[in-house]
């Protein structure tokens, strides 16, 4: 059984991943650092942290695998700089500290179109963090690139809800790559990738995450 660190446990995919991990017989303990406390669970260690000042010497960094679902949008973050901090700097800080304490597997929720050479800031940021993670030295690195996520978020994102309705109504007419992705499917793939720890670098495209 594995000891798993889950970053981003309060988000849409993160909540689904946390539920799966806590119920999984493959996971002996879940370490989920968050800004605010989560409901207690016998398998859960929930350090309340400031992601801008993570404690580098904490014992809870000693895990076997990391699943990272940290992420926001430029609109929710308030600026490109704030978005970059959440989607780039935070995942890298978590990855480096966990790797330094022995983690050998890392799985990340990235995004469709991630590319360090992209002219689109969002896609370029996602591509940059993927590239930087590859340089850390994990034995296993898996990058999930879902498209538009389904489900209900805590934040009100009118544009995403409109797109979900349109793409959902079109159904099978839409190419698999652009279909709405169930967050539960992303969560299951994220957890499996972290725990399976297949050697090397792997990319899971959006079309592999839809029904």
Image (cartoon, rainbow, N blue to C red):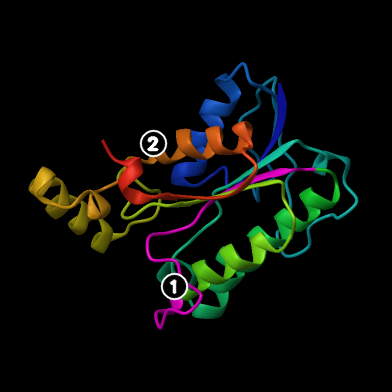
Residue found at x 73% / y 61%? 93
Q: Is residue 50 visible?
A: no
- x then y, percent, for residue 103: 77, 43
Q: Residue furthest right?
A: 57
- In the rendered view of the protein, which quadrant contains the N terminus? top right
Is 141 on the left or on the right of 186, as rendered? right
Residue 65 falls in image quadrant: top right
Q: Based on the picture, tell me whether residue 108 belongs to the magenta stretch.
A: yes
Is 210 on the left or on the right of 107, as rendered? left
Q: Determine which residue is flagged by label 1.
A: 122
Check contact, mark 1 vs mark 2: CB within 8 A.
no
Q: Determine which residue is flagged by label 2.
A: 185
- x then y, percent, for residue 43: 69, 23
Residue found at x 46% / y 33%? 188
Q: Is residue 3 above or below residue 25?
A: below
What is the span of residues highlighted in magenta in the rendered image?
103-122
Q: Based on the picture, tell me whether residue 137 belongs to the magenta stretch.
A: no
Q: Is residue 88 above or below residue 173?
A: below
């Amino acid at each position: 059984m594995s000891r798993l660190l889950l970053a981003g446990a309060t988000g849409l995919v993160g909540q689904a991943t946390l539920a799966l991990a806590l119920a999984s017989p493959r996971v002996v303990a879940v370490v989920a650092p968050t800004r605010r406390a989560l409901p207690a669970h016998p398998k859960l260690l929930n350090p309340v942290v400031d992601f801008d000042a993570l404690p580098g010497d904490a014992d809870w960094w000693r895990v076997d695998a990391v699943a990272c679902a940290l992420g926001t949008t430029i609109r929710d973050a308030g600026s490109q700089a704030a978005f970059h901090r959440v989607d780039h700097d935070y995942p890298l800080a978590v990855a480096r500290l966990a790797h330094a304490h022995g983690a050998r597997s890392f799985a990340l929720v990235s995004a469709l179109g991630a590319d360090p050479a992209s002219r689109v800031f969002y896609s370029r940021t996602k591509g940059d963090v993927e590239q930087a993670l590859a340089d850390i030295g994990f034995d296993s690195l898996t990058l999930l690139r879902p498209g538009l996520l389904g489900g209900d978020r805590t934040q009100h994102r009118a544009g995403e809800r409109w797109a979900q309705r349109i793409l959902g109504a079109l159904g099978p007419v839409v190419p698999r790559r652009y279909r709405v992705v169930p967050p539960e499917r992303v969560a299951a793939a994220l957890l499996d990738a972290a725990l399976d720890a297949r050697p090397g670098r792997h990319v899971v495209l959006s079309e592999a995450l839809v029904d």
